Image (cartoon, coloured by chain):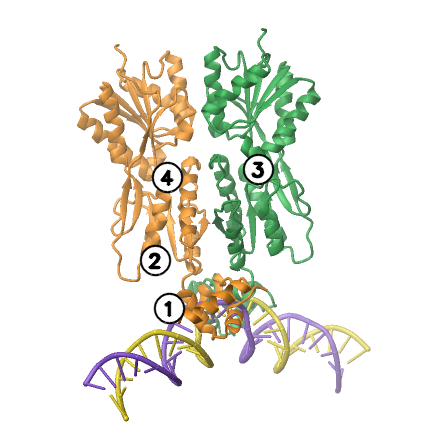
Chain colours: A orange, B green, C yellow, D purple
Amino acid sequence: MPPRMIDVARRANVALSTVSYAINGQRAVSEETRGRIRQAMEELGYQPNVLARGLASKHTNILALLFPTPERGLGVTEMEFVAGAADAAREHGYHLVLSPSELRNVRDLEQLTGQGLIDGALVMEVRIDDDRVQLLEQAGIPFSMIGRTSDPGRISYADIDFEQTTRDAVRHLVELGHRCIGFLNHSPSAYSVGYGPTVRASEGFRRAAAAAGVVYVERLCGDNASAGQAAFHELRAAQPDITALIVMNERAIVGVMDALDEIGWRVPDDLSIVAIVSSTRVTEMMRPKLTTWEPPSAELGRLGIQMLLDQIDGDGGEPTPTQELLPCRLAVGASSAPPPAR
Amino acid sequence: MPPRMIDVARRANVALSTVSYAINGQRAVSEETRGRIRQAMEELGYQPNVLARGLASKHTNILALLFPTPERGLGVTEMEFVAGAADAAREHGYHLVLSPSELRNVRDLEQLTGQGLIDGALVMEVRIDDDRVQLLEQAGIPFSMIGRTSDPGRISYADIDFEQTTRDAVRHLVELGHRCIGFLNHSPSAYSVGYGPTVRASEGFRRAAAAAGVVYVERLCGDNASAGQAAFHELRAAQPDITALIVMNERAIVGVMDALDEIGWRVPDDLSIVAIVSSTRVTEMMRPKLTTWEPPSAELGRLGIQMLLDQIDGDGGEPTPTQELLPCRLAVGASSAPPPAR
DNA sequence: GCTCCCAGTCGAAGCGCTTCGACTGTGGCA
DNA sequence: TGCCACAGTCGAAGCGCTTCGACTGGGAGC
């Protein structure tokens, strides 16, 4: 059996409670006593029992990461969120439990919160309207979000700045001389369930394009090649003068390439393509390598945990929520150029 | 405050211990009593406190997923492992804590096991010689592996069948008529630290190629485009007659394509390429779409958890370890064809 | 010189559960 | 008819910690 606190106490000739105070500093302990205790702990290889501590103290040092499995599947970006969050949690001495739950299945969530296991939760894949948010609020569980609802109120979140990202992408193309720009978004169903990136990028794109005074056109598109292929033909049918395309749908891109082949267009000579909110790990594999605005996924994960801990450790008094929008980073590729002189 | 077991007991007019027995069936409880208890639980919305239960019973229903961050970064495949494992754990009523640890840092692991938090661990990214395995063994923590050491002994594992996968890939190419086949593996450092896939695929490839009686050549190659590019030129320098390439290095592939451009070769006309142990999510984006042997990642994750639970729930008596090698699934693409008549 | 305060320590009462030993009443069996 | 076995239930003792109230002695303040 592993050593317990009482073993440490005996070896250091102090009371059990003194050891506890020495460890978590709830009361003063003399330097000398503390030294003896520390030594005893080391000699015994003592480690506090997380469960007992949690039971007695009402906080467990365990956080939950709520990640639903989206229709489009989990990609590199999601993995980076998770890894970033896990790292940050560990650095702060917290454990992270993975809670894969269907979005709709509020039961799972209730179960999680009711068990007294977790101190707080980080919610991934947040929708514009998200049941989980309400549930967590009324369960009184501290939480923060990666992404945000339409009205985040006083809830902390870290999200991608879609407004700026779309603006950047549009400006980039406009500066190259493009006057008719298309946007390939995620699927109609993602839009209709209120998936944040889909909705916000759509809005951002339209605003940016309108502000730039260019002709623009958007298509929602399933996350697969054949949908991408069809969508590009539709875009071109709607705007035959299209010379540039912004894509926020990694898996559709290759379909666009197929469509281009069909009509004998080349990138970037006949059409410029830029990817937004995509991992360069993926867009680097395209030929030509795509100009990409890459989301700061790991940072978002870290930040989410950070915010959550501010809320938990921030002693009691209503903390001011942190709400941050992070820009995507530009990785220059070879897929964008001035428009053709048609 | 959430209801406690004593609240349920009072409402059902029984002793606290009877409720406990009704819940986990350690002793017989009459049908009638059980009914009253169940009703009381529902009316109160009772959920057992995981910590208290764990403290008293010595098992927590929490598993750890040990995932180091490999040099090459985390990809789609890894995400699928994780998601599969998380799903399986939840289905069995277990929680999964993510434990991101440096491989070398055995401290982190000791800390995890010493805290009494986890019932067992699933070890990812296992090396041919892996310190963590020893440590877990002597800590007496049940565990299973995704991947395997050189001598897994009686430890349960689920791994990809590299022998068969390389054999399949070689046979596929040989049947098309190829007589000189190259293999692009992961990095030299992956090989030298004993990263299982790198070592085993290397061995498997050589054996399969030799058995098929073809000329073969292999290169270890960093996980990035420029390394891939250089590596292909080296392969061709070593074997100018090369007509086919097996690649187990997603990120190097695009470099190979670049190299082919330089010498004016096309796929599959001048060179057939097949990817092994790669996600089709990635190789589908290549043009042409690559013929791919895709690892059953989610299944591996699920299986790993399954094995772990067999070991934990399998009451006491030394269970026979489960050791399974899963084949990769073939996804046909357009990147392989008969060799050119040069 | 006396009080007061406080740093430093101790003992004990929980936290919400599991599990052990003990108790009761019923039915089977000789 | 008597005895035993056993299903069904209860009370109490932990599990390993945190935290509260209480106690001690010495220094500061007057």
Q: Nearer the viewer, mark 2 or mark 3?
A: 3
Residue linked to disc 2: A312
Query: Which label belongs to residue A26?
Result: 1
Q: Where B200 sits versus A120, above or below?
A: above
| Label 2 to label 3: alpha-carbon separation | 40 Å
Using a 10 Å C-alpha cutoff, classify the residue at mark 4 as few (fewer than 14 neighbours), some (14 to 19) or many (20 or more).
Answer: many
The x and y percentages for residue B62 are: 52, 55
| Label 3 to label 1: alpha-carbon separation | 45 Å
Element type at mark 4: helix
Q: Nearer the viewer, mark 4 or mark 3?
A: 3
Using a 10 Å C-alpha cutoff, classify the residue at mark 3 as few (fewer than 14 neighbours), some (14 to 19) or many (20 or more).
Answer: some
Q: Are marks 4 and 3 on the same chain?
A: no
Looking at numbered disc 3 in the image, what kind of residue is underneath it?
A: Val
**Mark 4 or mark 2, earlier in chain:** 4
Q: Residue at x 28, y 23 (%)?
A: A182
* Marked residue chain, label 4: A
Q: Nearer the viewer, mark 1 or mark 2?
A: 1
Residue linked to disc 3: B193
* Marked residue chain, label 1: A
Q: Is residue A242 left or right of residue B127?
A: left
Looking at numbered disc 4 in the image, what kind of residue is underneath it?
A: Ser
Element type at mark 1: loop
Residue linked to disc 4: A297
Q: Are marks 1 and 2 on the same chain?
A: yes
Element type at mark 2: helix
* Marked residue chain, label 3: B
Looking at numbered disc 1 in the image, what kind of residue is underneath it?
A: Gln
The x and y percentages for residue A292 are: 34, 28
